[in-house]
Image (tube, grey):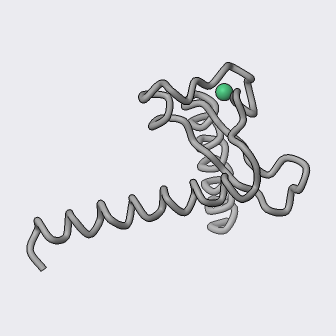
Amino acid sequence: MNRKQRRAREAQIRKDGNDELAAQVAMFGKLPEECTACEIPFDKKNKEMATTWNVVVRKEDEANPVRLYCPTCWNTAQEVINNYLKTMEENDEL
Ligand SMILES: [Zn+2]
């Protein structure tokens, strides 16, 4: 597979992933209109917001399965997770 084909394939995988997420959102309810964490409003007509915000579907939470995070809260969450994993690794080494 040459580089161009590989890139096309990766783009397709990414697109499929988004389609799947969109299908889940459609299945579980509508997209929240604000960040689940800090409650700043989300404008779905804003293309930049639509591409930078993150949607998480938690099927086990029936009352509020679709969660939406602004980039700031998303990054904070990633940092918390990374720090947690790092701490776990460090503890493993002891
Ligand atoms: Zn937020």
**Number of numbered discs present?**
0
Establish if 66 lies above or below 75.
below
- Quarter of the view holding residue 92: bottom right
- Relative depth, front residue between 15 and 2: 15
Residue lying furthest top: 40
Taking the spot 79% from the left edge, 62% from the top edge, the residue there is 59
Above-or-below relation of 6 to 62: below
Q: Is residue 7 left or right of residue 13?
A: left
Which is more toward the observer, 72 or 69? 69
Figure quadrant of the C terminus? bottom right
Residue name at image x 57 percent, y 42 percent: 54
In-image side of 1 versus 71 (left or right): left
User: Where does residue 33 sit, x and y in percent of width and height?
Assistant: 70, 29
Is 82 drawn above or below residue 11 in the view shown? above
Residue, x 68% and y 19% (percent of image)?
40
Q: Residue at x 73, y 24 (%)?
A: 38
How far from the left and from the top, in percent, is residue 71?
54, 31
Q: Residue farthest to the bottom?
A: 1
Q: Position of residue 60 (x, y in %)?
A: 85, 62
Which quadrant of the figure shows ligand 1? Answer: top right
Residue 48 in which image quadrant: top left
Place residue 27 in its image quadrant. bottom right
Q: Is residue 19 left or right of residue 12?
A: right
The percent coordinates of residue 80 (x first, y second) are 66, 42
Query: Looking at this view, is 46 or 13 the one in front?
Result: 46
Quadrant holding the N terminus: bottom left
